Image (cartoon, rainbow, N blue to C red):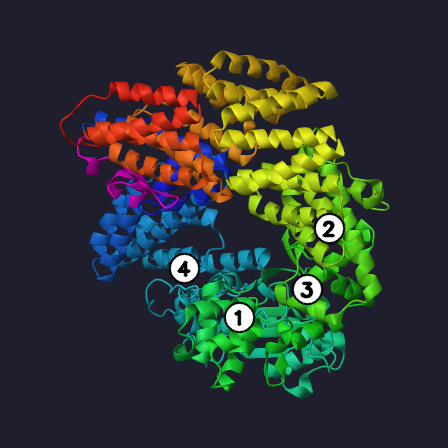
Amino acid sequence: MALHSDKRRQLLAALAVELGRPLSHTSLVHRLWDEEPPPSALTSLYSHVSHLRALLRRAGRAAGTESPGEVPTIDTRSHTYTLRADPQLIDWQRYLDLSQRAGLLAGNGQDHQARTVLSRAEELWGGEPLAGLPGDWARTTRATMADQRFATTLQRIELDLRIGRHHELIPELAALREDRPTDERLAGHLMTALHAAGRQADALAVYPAVVRLLRAHLGTDPGEELTRLHRLMLNGEPLPGTPGRVELVRAADSPAEAAAPASGAPGRHRMIGRRDDLRRVLPGAAARGGVVTVSAILGMPGVGKTTLALHAADLMREHFPEGYVHLNLRAHVGNQPPLTPEATGALLLRRLGVPATTIPLDADEVFALCVETLSTRRAVLVLDDAANASQIRPLLPPAPAALVIVTSRQRLAELPGSRPVFLDVLPVDDAVALFTDLVGPERSADRDRVVEIVNRCGLLPLAIELAASRLRARPSWTLDHLARRLSRRGRLAEIRSGSDSIARAFEVSYQYLPANQRSAFRLLGLYPGPDFGVHAAAALLGRTVDETDQVLEALLNCHLLIEISPERYQLHDLLRDFAVALGVEEDLRESSVDRLLRFALSAADQADHLLYPRRSRAELLIGHQLHDPEALLADLAMDSAESARTWLEAEIATLIALAAHAHRAGHAETGARLAHVLAGHLDAEAYWSEAQDMHRTAAALWRSEANDLQEAWALSDLGATLANASQYEHAVEALERSLALARREGDPDATANALGLLGRLRWNQSRLHEALALQEEVLAIRVEQEDQLNAARCLANIGILHRSVGNSEAAQTAYESALPCARDFNDRVLELRILNNLGELHSSSGRHSEARSTFERILEIGDGLMPPVDLSVVRVNLAGTLRIPAELDRALSLHQAALSTFREVGSVRYESDGLNSLGQTLSSARRHKEALDQHATALRLARSIGAAREEAAALRGLGRCEAELGNTAAARAHLTAAIHLAEQVDIADEAALARSALADLKPKSSYNLHH
């Protein structure tokens, strides 16, 4: 089966490597495009899967495979793809299977049989795996496969040693050692083979060579196993066999397993979850024969750093048997200063058993003795709550033999050779398991309430432990009672137990901040959005961008801030509450919030003008802008439509929150103007639910202030949003009042805007002649204003209406008049919308090839330009031009992607239209019963919002399906109802289609088609 596309080869490889396992669409996108997939990645993925399915079917037919079970298939379920195939068809799966079978045989003492099976496995290895495939996933998978091959090779070598093939192994082992000269297992196997072959001198010579290499490259000596093997050879003692392998400590696979202590450990440090974090702390620690990287566990107060460190130490004690030390370095004890480096060193030496009388007094000598001791001592050290890297750096050798685990609220970037492990809050399931473990299953049976409680605790382990301890100490309390207490304002005061509290843990970190950072931390607690960038923070703090960047980095380094993406920050919920509780002076609060809102309004206004340069809107008066915007706005570098889109996409959730906050904080007019400035983007990106609240609040404000013109604009914004959300009655009410106010004020732009929106709404309601009259009135105003671009937009809408009433010639004239203007003004979105309308005209006229090429071109260049709803409309249109059943898979993928968008944004009308189109596709594939279901759902949705066009189309679709299924009476009833409805509201094109379907209807005996 020839695959000429790298992406399809990579997709097939990804599915084959994970044979039988579902892979999510998101996972596959990242395997094909790494961390920066294009906006069209999902659509491309659907296309690649469709092509692979077709190729697999053709390959099956060419191979003479008739049975469906014998042909590899790609199954779809719940946004995943799974390759179903015989594992024997895939070399990698056969290799793994043979390796596993060999291991079972060897475990049962059947060495010769196991050796035969491994020989068959090695015959499958025919060069570099996934050869020629680009990207991170292919590179990582190749490395994983190479590691697996090496492990299997070692397995086979061990069998050969037991069987006695010593002479044959010597050349192979020597060659392998050239690639892995410091691998102690290979060295041990080579020494054993040489010794068994009678070459004792050569065998003994391997060991000093390994010692030199390890010391030169890794700064360590060989591990105990290889040293013991060498000693046995020197003493002429019998060898016990191949050197034993030191196993990695495997992180637990379940919370219960993670909680179990290691063998011989006291089990004091029980832990729930953190399996992935544990793997990051411990990978390879025991297997490197003494070269152990320092693990630095970092995170905010209360996140569980100490618990993880002590649990990891307990697991590793049997592998590091020469000592166990836990030192609290006291960075955040509060009433005691942190330990100095020399005090830490002296205490560490005493805990390791060095006699106090032999510990030097000179600091440098203490450091030298620590370095010497930790270079050779296989001990476990937990250095807890470090203040900074300088507190522990002098104590550590370049390559310690000890396992050293450091915890800190600081980042410790200056600690050489350390592996940072940043702890986040717990996943919900682990948080629930922790709470349940602490209070007992009988008091935590209501999982929903426990989830609420742990979320109120911010998923922070310390907070969860304190809340659980409080519940446990109050037998009369229920989960409901605790949840209610945690839902109050001032929940920090509720997260306590005895003298311990979460606020106290935060306070210790806060007290160690210098004054400027404490002030910034308190002010950041005022920020109303979910996250913030440097410029918004600079506006709030009243500092320059450079000054703000420095203070944010300082707060980040001590884990009082979270950086969720480059230069985008967030306060943990409980830290935000703590910052708010600390308080800000009233005057400072007022000036800071005012600065932030003016910055947000000025920046959003600039973004709106760049991204929607000729949108109908009220202009922002100078008095409402930032007093001195140059410095902050200039530093934003927002100078193009693309940069404006990037900024809005990052800030939109925060801007929505700011608009709401402005009304609550006494800046209602700024909030109302911010809502209007954002209206274009909220509409284009389908933030319809949020926009409704913003525009409704703005309209109420302007009405209370008797500002009719601003109320007219706010009501237009509200009406557009309501219409998009298919709430037609409320939309009509808002738009009619907007129109009346705009006319009373004599503002032609506001009037034309309200008329245009009302015209679009009437089209949605299938009141076509009324809609056409409204749009023609808009056109007259735009022509009088000499507003060519908005006149072109109006012509595009008029074209849609002409097509709907059956006047295709007038529709084409309108489109062709509007298109050059869109191009002259470089309005790509309008241009692509008009091209889509022309494509629909081609399709309805039977020019499917021309329509298809138009839709394909729009999707190719429109991704990232057009709003998501518009792109989904084009996908539905394209699906309608595909050849069915030959291209059924692609058509269904297009429909599914479009319907997902329509449902996500809440557009009932578009969803109904999409379901009707999907029904037509299924019917063309002779899957009439499935098509019937889609049309029935479309009918219900259309009737729920009064969308007559979609209702008539659904009735027509039901009629055609019933006819194909042999239910002539039902078919006739549906088609007659479709004709009556379409004629009643004068939808000429839909009425013609229904009449044609009725004319084709012939009496049939009842029968069912196979589909």
The residue at which mark 4 appears reads as 188
Q: Amino acid at mark 3?
A: Leu
Q: Amino acid at mark 4?
A: Gly
Mark 1 neighbour class, 10 Å CA radius: few under 14, some 14 to 19, many 20 or more = many
The residue at which mark 2 appears reads as 704
Per the model, the C-alpha gap separating discs 4 and 1 is: 35 Å
Q: Nearer the viewer, mark 2 or mark 4?
A: 2
Per the model, the C-alpha gap separating discs 3 and 4 is: 50 Å
Q: What SS does tag 1 mark?
A: helix
Per the model, the C-alpha gap separating discs 1 and 3 is: 20 Å
- Looking at the rendered image, the quarter that the N terminus falls into is top left
Report the residue that reaches farthest toward the right: 628
Q: Quadrant of residue 416?
A: bottom right
Q: Position of residue 809 (x, y in %)?
A: 50, 11
Q: What SS does tag 2 mark?
A: helix
Viewer-closest of 165 and 391:
391
The answer to which of marks 2 and 3 sits earlier in the sequence is 3
The residue stretch that appears in magenta? 65-93
Residue 766 shows in the view: yes
Q: Nearer the viewer, mark 4 or mark 1?
A: 1
The residue at which mark 1 appears reads as 308
The residue located at (56%, 78%) in the rendering is: 466
Q: What SS does tag 3 mark?
A: loop
Report the residue that reaches farthest toward the left: 1005
Mark 4 neighbour class, 10 Å CA radius: few under 14, some 14 to 19, many 20 or more = many
The residue at which mark 3 appears reads as 560
Q: Amino acid at mark 2?
A: Ser
Viewer-closest of 786 and 148:
786
Q: Amino acid at mark 1?
A: Leu
The residue located at (22%, 61%) in the rendering is: 109
Per the model, the C-alpha gap separating discs 2 and 3 is: 42 Å
